[in-house]
Image: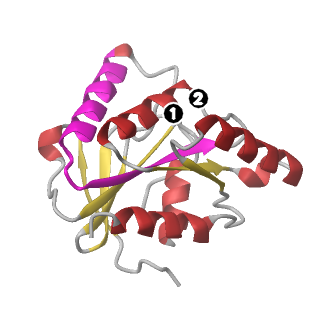
């Protein structure tokens, strides 16, 4: 049974004017295209197809907003780092992200979704800097951990946490095996509670 049975899609926005209700608390999810961000959101919310997954990297080009319970939301930010996205789309993404982090008063935290096999990259660092500029705490999900051996996944976690230092907390995560789902739910609740 889902921990969030009331979770529902609210709207998609391609500009700051379209973000909508800014009351309550909101946690943003960001990640490289094909990092498993939509699958992570679905696993955390316990809803199979709430956030749309796609085999085509770069499918999420809008800010998609989901209500968990009244007054608490998730914002699924556009995927980044996909080479085939036109320069104009990259520039739109940059402006959209700057507007989101600058104007969203309800923003309580950021979850950065990173494919454990690829590691924390330059674009992930940009998102971390956006959050730091806002004073938002950050949780890093090292997804697809089931595709690594136990020793390799633990090594990736140690290296990532060492590189992040005190700037963010990292954890292993797998939407397939549900490894780390409970911990990610706890992190989400803690972030949302900052603005209670």
Residue, x 55% and y 44% (percent of image)? 166
Specify the quadrant of the image occupied by residue 61.
top left
Residue 138 percent across, percent down from the top left? 46, 48
Residue for badge 1: 124
Judged left or right of residue 144, residue 11 is left
Tell me which corner region of the image, top left, top right, bottom left or bottom right, holds residue 22: bottom left
Observer-nearest residue: 134 or 126? 134
Where does label 2 land, which residue?
Answer: 121
Residue 190 coordinates in the image, percent (x, y): 43, 67
Task: Name the residue at 11% across, 42% down.
Answer: 17
| Secondary structure state at the residue bearing disc 2 | loop
Let me know if residue 32 is in the magenta part.
no
At 69% from the left and 43% from the top, the residue drawn is 116
The residues colored magenta run 88-115
Q: Disc 1 to disc 2, how far (Cα)? A: 5 Å
Local crowd at mark 1 within 10 Å, few (<14), some, or many (≥20)?
A: many
- The single residue placed furthest to the front in the displayed view is 166
Q: Residue 134 carries which label?
A: none
Q: In this view, does 31 lie to the left or right of 100?
A: right
Q: Are marks 1 and 2 in contact (CB under 8 Å)?
A: yes
| Residue 102 shows up from this direction | yes
Please give the name of the residue rendered at 34% of the width and 23% of the height, measured from the top-left corner: 89
* Secondary-structure class at tag 1: helix
State whether residue 81 appears in this view. Answer: no
Q: How crowded is mark 2: few (under 14 residues within 10 Å), some or many (20 or more)?
A: few
Specify the quadrant of the image occupied by residue 27: bottom left
Query: Is 114 colored magenta in this rendering?
Result: yes
């Amino acid at each position: 049974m889902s921990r969030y049975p009331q979770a529902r899609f609210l709207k998609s926005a391609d500009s700051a004017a379209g973000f909508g209700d800014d009351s309550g608390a909101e946690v943003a999810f960001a990640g490289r295209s094909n990092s498993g961000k939509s699958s992570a959101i679905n696993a955390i919310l316990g809803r199979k197809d709430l956030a749309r997954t796609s085999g085509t990297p770069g499918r999420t080009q809008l800010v998609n907003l989901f209500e968990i319970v009244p007054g608490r939301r998730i914002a699924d930010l556009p995927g980044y780092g996909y080479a085939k996205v036109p320069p104009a789309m990259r520039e739109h993404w940059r402006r959209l992200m700057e507007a989101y982090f600058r104007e969203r008063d309800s923003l309580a935290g950021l979850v950065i979704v990173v494919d454990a096999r690829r590691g924390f990259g330059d674009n992930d660092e940009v998102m971390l800097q956006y959050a730091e500029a806002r004073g938002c705490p950050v949780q890093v999900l090292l997804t697809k951990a089931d595709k690594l051996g136990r020793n390799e996944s633990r090594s990736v976690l140690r290296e990532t946490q060492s590189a992040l230092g005190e700037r963010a907390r990292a954890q292993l995560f797998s939407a397939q095996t549900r490894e780390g789902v409970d911990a990610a739910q706890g992190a989400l609740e803690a972030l949302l509670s900052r603005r209670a």
